[in-house]
Amino acid sequence: MGRNQDIDRLLRELSELAVDGYYLALHVRFAAPMMMFQTFNRAWIDHYIQNAYALRDPVIAWGVSQPGPTRWSAITLPDPFGIMKEAEAFGLRYGVVISCGPMTSRSVASLTSATREFTDEEIATASGIILRLHHETQPPDNLTDAEIEALRVVASGERYAAGAAGLGISESALKARLATARKKLFARTSAEAIQRAKDYRLL
């Protein structure tokens, strides 16, 4: 099974645990995650984004500040904007936040239930899933010189044929290098790979 299939399987397992939705930010660096997934209801997501709650959310603040799991009900951080109370109105009544990894590349997940608290066993299972997802999506420490050259060619706006000629390689070789770089960076497109490489100071 490939890494992307492993990630898909783990996300399905997470969905089975968090039937009322979850938010997952993997490898948060420079205030932005490398990958993000969320299945909270659309109305809450829209409300959350419109009010810029990510910068004020005590759940996220807890997850960023320390590793491990805790129930939302156990978080004692200030909530001056009443975000947790507003979440209840959208059906997000109970939840758990789980975080792992170093401060320089932390992964944070928030799972919700509309009807009850998560059990200790469910929290332990969810923590294992988040930890595996964190490891499966570990960004590369570096790219090869050839992969960096290929990304730079595309970033400069060169067409593949001209860029390959400039590097003294075939167009298919250039495309192969780009494909490898995209795979390492978990990017669907070359533009996304370029942005991630820049975010991670690899380019």
Image (cartoon, grey):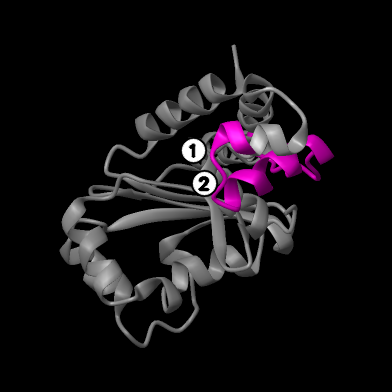
Local packing at callout 1 (Cα closer than 10 Å; few below 14, some 14-19, many 20+) is few
Mark yes or no: residue 102 visible. Answer: yes
Q: Nearer the viewer, residue 92 or 12?
A: 12
Q: Whole-percent x and y of residue 181?
A: 67, 35
- For image coordinates 69% across by 43% down, the residue present is 139
Q: Whole-percent x and y of residue 201?
A: 73, 59
Q: Whole-percent x and y of residue 127?
A: 57, 41
Q: Is residue 15 left or right of residue 203?
A: left
Tell me the amino acid under the disc marked 2: Glu
- Judging by the rendered image, the residue that carries numbered circle 1 is 189
Q: Whole-percent x and y of residue 21?
A: 31, 45
Quarter location, residue 17: top left
Q: Quote the CA–CA distance across marks 2 and 1.
A: 5 Å
Which range is magenta? Answer: 136-162
Residue that lies at the very extreme toward the top in this rendered image: 1
Quadrant where the image shows the N terminus: top right
Tell me the amino acid under the disc marked 1: Thr
- For image coordinates 73% across by 62% down, the residue present is 104
- For image coordinates 69% across by 41% down, the residue present is 138
Quarter location, residue 130: top right
- Judging by the rendered image, the residue that carries numbered circle 2 is 192
Quadrant where the image shows the C terminus: bottom right
Q: Nearer the viewer, residue 11 or 118?
A: 11
Tell me the number on the disc at residue 75: none
The answer to whether 158 is drawn above or below residue 105 in the figure is above
Is there a contact, CB below 8 Å, between mark 2 and mark 1? Answer: yes
Q: Is residue 128 left or right of residue 146?
A: left
- For image coordinates 69% across by 32% down, the residue present is 165
Residue 150 falls inside the magenta stretch: yes
Residue 143 falls inside the magenta stretch: yes
